[in-house]
Image (tube, rainbow, N blue to C red):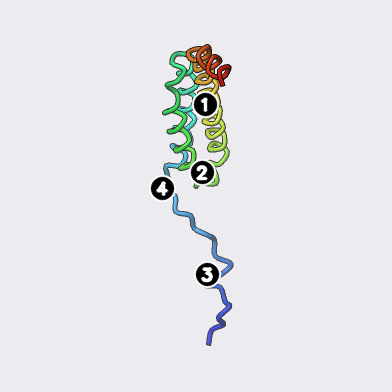
Amino acid sequence: MQNSNAPIFPENQPVVINLSGNEQAFAIASIVMNVIGLCMMSLFPTCNLPFAIVGAVLAFLAWKDPRQRVWSVIALSFSAVNVIFICIVLGYLLLIVAGPEMMEYFRNL
């Protein structure tokens, strides 16, 4: 009779992670997308949001491979910088466009 507390899988066998083999390509593509997004920031300040989103998704896909984790962290940090720049630019544009009306609205409260 088997012991009911025995583990299902033997402890000495390595854990197998199913990788698609594209994780390195995902990591490189993520960094490229984020760099393109940062370059697009100088031309069209609000158009780099799709690049940041696609870069973050590709970085998360590359995260599965332990050898690509450093590249994934770099790509995710680039995505975060892209999103922060987008927020700063949109806030600045909002102040320029709606600044006087917003100030008048808050004075009348």
Q: Which residue is drawn at 45% across and 23% down?
A: 48
Q: How crowded is mark 3: few (under 14 residues within 10 Å), some or many (20 or more)?
A: few
Q: How far apart are marks 2 and 3 (CA)?
A: 25 Å
- Labels 4 and 1: the sequence-earlier one: 4
Which residue lies under the disc numbered 3? 9
Q: Are marks 4 and 2 in contact (CB under 8 Å)?
A: no
Mark 4 nearby-residue class (10 Å; few <14, some 14–19, many ≥20): few
Disc marking residue 20: 4
Can you tell which mark lies on residue 63? 2
- The quadrant where residue 47 appears: top left
From the viewer's perspective, is the residue at label 1 or at label 3 nearer?
1
- Camera-nearest residue between 96 and 28: 96
Q: Distance between the residues labelled 4 and 2?
A: 12 Å
Which residue is the site of mark 1? 82
Q: Position of residue 74 (x, y in %)?
A: 56, 33
Which amino acid lies under the numbered mark 2 shown in the image of this protein? Trp
- Name the residue rendered at 46%, 33% in the picture: 55
Query: Which amino acid, by three-letter code, is at mark 4?
Result: Ser
Q: Which of marks 4 and 2 is in front?
A: 2
